[in-house]
Amino acid sequence: MPASAPTLADTLARFRRGKGPRLVARASVERTTRVTPPHRHPEGQLFGATRGVLTVGTDAGLWVVPSSHAVWVPPHHRHSLRSHGAFDGSSVYVAETACAGLPATACAIRCTGLLREAVARAATWNGGAPDAARQRIAGLILDEIRAAPQEPLGLPLPADARLMRIARALLDDLADARGLEDWAAFGALSARTLSRRFAAETGFTFADWRQRARLMRALEMLAAGTPVTTIALSLGYDNVSAFIAMFRRVHGVTPARFMPSRSVAA
C-alpha cells in the first residue's frame, strides 16, 4: 500500500529540524468565511488569492488583498487571516533558513504571472524528495518574492497606545463622523499632538488614514456581495455617489467594475 502524502504539520516539523524542501505550498478553496486567529510560527508565509479578497493582519498593520496581489509575512511575525465571500487562493510556507534576502517586514507585493504559476505547480507536490526540478521551482518562487516591488496596500497601525485606542475605535465603526478635536478628547491628548503623532507613526494624516480604512473595508464588503448603497451608508458617506467617486479616484474603476466576478447591486 503506498505511503500517504505528508501533512502540512509533518512538513513544517521537518523544516524545523533543518530537513526537507525549502518551501511548501498549499491551495485552498473556501466557500464560507475563513477566520484564523492571531498566531506566529518560524516559517515565512506568502498569502495569495486567485478569487475573492483576503484580509491579513499583523501587529503593525492590516492588508486587504485582491487577487492581483499577495502578502508576505516574515518568520516569527504574529498574524491573522480572514477571507470575504467565496475565496480561492494559496499559501506558501518558507523555511526560516531560506528567508534570507526576503522582506524583513510584512508587506504586499504584486503577483506576477510567473509567481502565480510557480506556486500553483508547487501546490501539486505530494511529498517526496525535492528533486532538481522542484528545487528550481522553489528557487524561482523565492526569487520572485525577493524581486517583487512592495505595493502600498496596507493600513499601518500606530504604536502609541492612545493612538491605537483611537484607531481601533474607528475600525470598529468607520461611519463614526467625529472630527479631529473629538477624537483627540477620546484619546486624552491634544488635537495638535494627535495630528502630529498620527502622521509620524502611520505615514498618513488622520483624515487620509480614515479614508484609507474606509476604502479597505469597502473591498471586504464588495467581496462578500454587499450592495454598493449599503456599503456607502455603513462607511459614513453622505450618499452613494460620493462613495463611488472616491472609490473611482483611488482604484481607477467603479466598485462594480472592481469586482466583475460578482453581481454587485447598487
Image: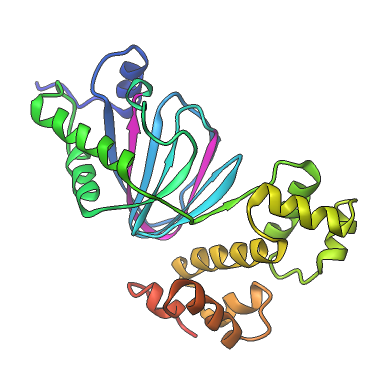
Q: Is residue 128 above or below residue 44?
A: above
Q: Is residue 73 above or below residue 86?
A: above
The mark total stands at 0
What is the x, y in percent for residue 153?
48, 56
Residue 87 lies in the magenta stretch: yes
The residue drawn where x is 32% and y is 29% is 8
Q: Is residue 119 above or below residue 244?
A: above
Q: Quadrant of residue 52?
A: bottom left
Determine whether, in the image, residue 24 is placed left or right of residue 80. Answer: left
Residue 203 lies in the magenta stretch: no
What is the x, y in percent for residue 258?
40, 73
Out of 111 and 229, give the one closest to the viewer. 111
Determine whether, in the image, residue 113 is placed left or right of residue 187. Answer: left
Determine whether, in the image, residue 142 is placed left or right of residue 45. Answer: left
Magenta part mainly helix, strand or loop? strand
Out of 110 and 174, give the one closest to the viewer. 110
Q: Quadrant of residue 59?
A: top right
The segment highlighted magenta reads: 78-95
